[in-house]
Image (tube, rainbow, N blue to C red):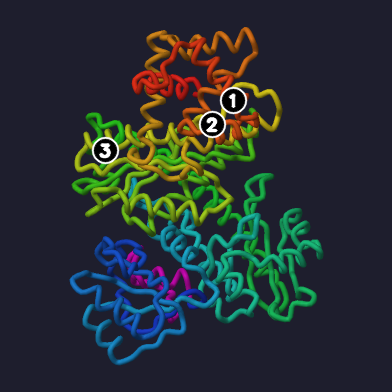
Amino acid sequence: MSDRHEPRFTRFSLGRVLDDLGLTLLEVVHGRIDDQQDIGGVVIYDPVDEPLYPEHAVVLGVGVHGSDGLSDLLAGLAGHTIAAVVVRSPVEITDEVRALADEHGVVVLGLARGATWTQLAALLRSLLAEDDVGDTHVDSLGGIPSGDLFAVANAISSLLDAPVTIEDRSSRVLAFSGRQEEADPARAETIIGRRVPERYRHQLTQQGVFRELYRSEDPVVIARIEAEADMSTQRVAIGVRAGDEVLGSIWAAMDGPLTDERRITLRDAAKLVALHLLRVRAGADVQRRLRAELLSTALEGGSGASEALSRLNLSGQPVCVVAAVLTETEHGGAGGADQALMAERERFADALAVHLSAMRPGSAVALLGDTAYGILPEPNDPTGDHAVRTMEDFLDRVGSRMSAVIAVGPPADDIGGISRSRASARRVLRALLEPAAGQAVAPQEQTAAGTAAAAGGRARAGGARSRVARLSDVHASVLMLELRDLMVVRGDEFTGPVSRLMEHDAKQKGHLVDTLRAWFDHFGDVAKAADMLFVHPNTFRYRLRRAVEISGIDLDNADDRFEAMLQLRLLER
């Protein structure tokens, strides 16, 4: 790829993306780059499912290997207008592959070994999504569109005549210039991984480089890292500040002395990058608020819902609503802890947005309160199975780093349907967040018995609780919660046999309520019920007889059994 000093391409063209990502990450294997055609989106190829291809999309061929797999991918693009497909390098270009690519006008790109598909999808998303919502007017800082860090990196690179990276305080690469292939293997590893490898960070920390970098306003020269032969090119770095706050740093891979001209260039560049980083931060906040307002308006289904859906590019297509909540966080309390908790929720919502941008192009995600809501395009998915699999895949990807539950609403075809889908998702989410039925049990006569009863309660709730669910998955739990709410609103109290047992246990410190519950839970199997309560079967039989005598319940009557079982379940909650 040539070094374009005067770009002719439009802002989101394939040529622009390739110039920003550089040869280190992507290479053009076959095809001609159209610098005037905008990219319409990013889609992950799935050989067993028909994806929704936006016009001029970039298709990520995850798991596509060999010329046969690539041929199948290209053949399946017939009837679609696709800008490019990306497969893992090295790419085998046969006559068949070449003919299919030319027939469909598709550019074939190779993804470098070591780079992950998640990284690539996130990078493409960050480049393509800047103007998804709101005003498309772009301010200029130093003659460069504000927040366009890749353009800033290329400008600094041209002034220094060296490949450049812009990094945050955690050594994550925010942007990089072209010509990275001219640097050493250490820089290539940094670009592919999108952050400085930990062994380099450790060495730089040991040598006091970061301490000097963040204390000084002058550039710092790093001649070499001990015991790292892969870093053969000298580094020159400078901290980026906004007042007393350190925002990040600029790193140039260049040999030779640090001349006064280079020193002045880096100082000026640090000031410019600081402005852009602050603009990125402010812009992200504005975009987040705007997207949240549009999503909230669309979900409420009021007079502005139609316009909100139009601005989110979700009008006129079947969608469904998902609602996600973090269930375990490391923060709590007030003040700074509250801010950290909110930041954690925002990171979770951002992670969900990135995942859906790749898996469900056109999705909209925003954090409303403590819940991340999403509206997903769901063509040809009347049951919602596709959405459930997408959400399960997301939770599998974030793993233990973000423990969460997600509710999936039913498909919707209009504004009223979207509002109903959200209401359904909220009902499901509440059931997922409520403690499992039966976890709160009456005190047992010994610790082991209490533990066993709690375990039995969890078993009654259906074993391991799913992290992703639709209404059909938890309908009984939802209805139980709503029945409990109805009792509270009306001021109803427990009456009948269960009420009499509760009064007896409170006065005599007995266990008759637990006995009746265990008998129901084990379908009248005295041996299993007694084992659950850690008592002898004869003791259990005696207690059951006492429960029948005191309550007056007829265990042979189906209606009596149902009423008692229902009250016991409500009592557990």
Q: Secondary structure at mark 1?
A: helix
Find out whether residue 86 is within the magenta segment: no
**Residue 530 rendering spot, x and y as whole percentages:** 59, 31
* Most foreground residue, 1 or 275: 1
Q: Looking at the rendered structure, which numbered label has been put on residue 526?
A: 2
**Residue 189 rendering spot, x and y as whole percentages:** 61, 73
Contact between marks 2 and 1 (CB within 8 A): the answer is yes
How crowded pointer 3 is (Cα within 10 Å; few <14, some 14-19, many 20+) is rated as many
- The kind of residue tagged 2 is Val
- What is the CA distance from the residue labelled 3 to the residue labelled 2? 49 Å
- The residue that appears at 42% across and 35% down in the rendered structure is 429
Find out whether residue 8 is within the magenta segment: yes
- What is the CA distance from the residue labelled 1 to the residue labelled 3? 52 Å
**Residue 11 rendering spot, x and y as whole percentages:** 35, 63
- The kind of residue tagged 3 is Ile
Residue 523, quarter of picture: top left
In this view, the mark in front (1 or 3): 1
Residue hosting label 3: 418
For marks 2 and 1 on the same chain, the one whose residue lies earlier in the sequence? 2
Residue 474, quarter of picture: top left
- The residue that appears at 45% across and 11% down in the rendered structure is 552
Residue hosting label 1: 540
